Image (cartoon, rainbow, N blue to C red):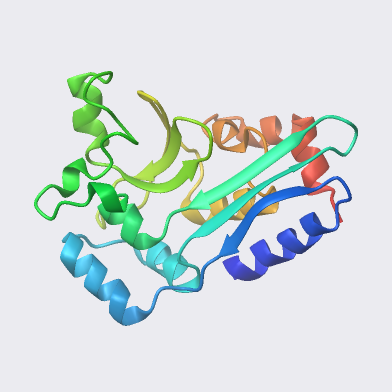
Amino acid sequence: MWKELLNARIEVLRKQQSLNLRACLVNEGIEEELLQRVLREAGVELPAELMEFYREMNGVELDWSIWPSGEEIPGAILLLPLQKTLFGYPERIERTRYSDAFEDSLWTRDSFSNESIDELKQHRVLEAIPGEPAFVTFKPSLHSGLHLFFVYEEDISSIQVPLGEYLRLIFEHLGAARIREHLTREDWKQVIESDSKLTTIRRMR
């Protein structure tokens, strides 16, 4: 479902004459044996909807710009593979310190308050925003459901839509412009509809 939607939108993107496509990679889904091993090693359980996503595609890297009317519209999607989502980037993996896996990316000891660090240590990174100190995160939990957050430096904002709707909107708009910030607002529907750059992307055929 998700791969079909994203690939269809990428094909539309490729038709745009002013396109600068810097990266385009949609990974195959994670194999079940590897999925279960990663979860056991990380000592976490994830909601079914998130595991179904990783079974379909284990990471996306898309980075592009278009100039439909002389003004740049940039977009990017960088959904991390499950291994990086749970364990952090390879240079940060330390088996006894998974809570520090995103040090120097999601947070830094020198510039973040202890309160922010304690909070962000509970998060895992679903998506990194290329070129920005920003991430979309979640807290691994079966009991409270999957809630997404938009993290910009020490500012942590709740995303107002569930995972499925988040993926649909990000894929439909190909990660363009400020869509993630818009999704932290209670009036996100109106804000997205009134954003001229996102409207341009929605109307691409």
- Residue 159 in percent (x, y) is at 47, 38
- In the image, residue 98 sits, relative to residue 149, either above or below, namely below
- Residue 140, visible in the rendered structure: no
| Quarter of image, res 105 | top left
- Residue 67, visible in the rendered structure: yes
Q: Quadrant of the N terminus?
A: bottom right
- Residue 158 in percent (x, y) is at 42, 34
Residue at 18 percent of width and 68 percent of height = 40
- In the image, residue 202 sits, relative to residue 158, either above or below, namely below
Residue at 80 percent of width and 48 percent of height = 19
Count of numbered tags: 0
- Residue 61 in percent (x, y) is at 55, 55
- In the image, residue 31 sits, relative to residue 162, either above or below, namely below
Which of these two is toward me, 101 or 165? 101
Q: Residue furthest left?
A: 96
- Residue 161 in percent (x, y) is at 51, 44
Q: Is residue 71 left or right of residue 59?
A: right
Which of these two is toward me, 197 or 164? 197
| Quarter of image, res 149 | top left
Q: Is residue 74 left or right of residue 110?
A: right
Which of these two is toward me, 165 or 105? 105
Q: Quadrant of the C terminus?
A: bottom right
Residue at 28 percent of width and 18 percent of height = 111
